[in-house]
Image (tube, rainbow, N blue to C red):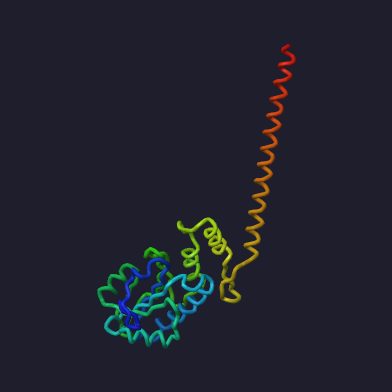
Amino acid sequence: MVSSHGEELNLHQFRGKPLVISLIYTSCYHTCPTMTNQLARAVDIAREALGQGSFSVLTIGFDTPSDTPDRMRVFARERGIDMPDWWFASTDALTINQLTEELGFTYVRSVRGFDHLTQTTIVNADGTIFDQVYGELVHAPSFVEPLKRLVWGGDAKATALSGWIKSVKLVCTVYDPNTGRYTFDYSIFITMVIGIASLGAVAGFAIKHWWETGRRTTRNKHSTGILERFFRF
């Protein structure tokens, strides 16, 4: 693949963090521009919630004779997209055939250009398809929630502290339909802290009760032994 700026790209270089893949064709006059504009909005919301650099985006032109690097660059500029970690790329027909088969993306030539699936694919850090988002209108929750699970979900390399912090972020970062953005809900965090504190208090009480019961049992055994020795004589 070649980026819109002439750089050689390889899918392997995107491993290590989630990747969003979008297939378009540059001569599309409605569906692809609309979907890409919607995707740009969802990406902005996701990066605000998850942090810059938390995932990458790759938009590839599937009309290989026409979707040259120059055309891809113009397409991105017309959408006003100039974001870090978002590449627009061209490739050859063989790569497109392999990629569309793996992604489950379909397209056929028509009198209007192409009839194609409107699909955004979310790939995990190991290069495995994790989720698909369908439709021209990319709704923020359907796009951000899978990325939340990938970015803040289970991480075998995470320490206990960082794993706990990610778990808190995963649970407490929620979508606000009034603003259309994600926010950290402190009430959920406070409820979690209170719940953990309550469980700790209950556990402490149980341990104290077990300890005191054990001590009383030990004292009773000692007392019984003395009485037995007394009456034995």
Position of residue 157 in the picture relative to residue 172 (left or right)? left
Q: Is residue 63 above or below residue 130?
A: below
Q: Position of residue 26 (x, y in %)?
A: 35, 84
Q: Position of residue 136 (x, y in %)?
A: 44, 78
Q: Quadrant of the N terminus?
A: bottom left
Q: Position of residue 222 (x, y in %)?
A: 70, 25
Q: Is residue 208 above or below residue 218?
A: below
Q: Position of residue 230 (x, y in %)?
A: 74, 15
Residue shown at the point (45%, 82%) measured from the top left = 37
Residue shown at the point (57%, 61%) measured from the top left = 168
| Residue 182 falls in image quadrant | bottom right
Q: Is residue 194 above or below residue 114?
A: above
Position of residue 93 in the picture relative to residue 207 (left or right)? left
| Residue 23 falls in image quadrant | bottom left
Residue shown at the point (64%, 66%) measured from the top left = 186
Task: Work out whether residue 38 or residue 157 is closer to the camera in this orientation and state it.
Answer: 157
How many marks the image carries: the answer is 0
Task: Work out whether residue 213 or residue 34 is closer to the camera in this orientation and state it.
Answer: 213
Position of residue 169 in the picture relative to residue 233 (left or right)? left
Residue shown at the point (69%, 34%) measured from the top left = 213
- From this viewpoint, which residue is outermost toward the left? 94
| Residue 156 falls in image quadrant | bottom left
Position of residue 168 in the picture relative to residue 105 (left or right)? right
Q: Quadrant of the C terminus?
A: top right
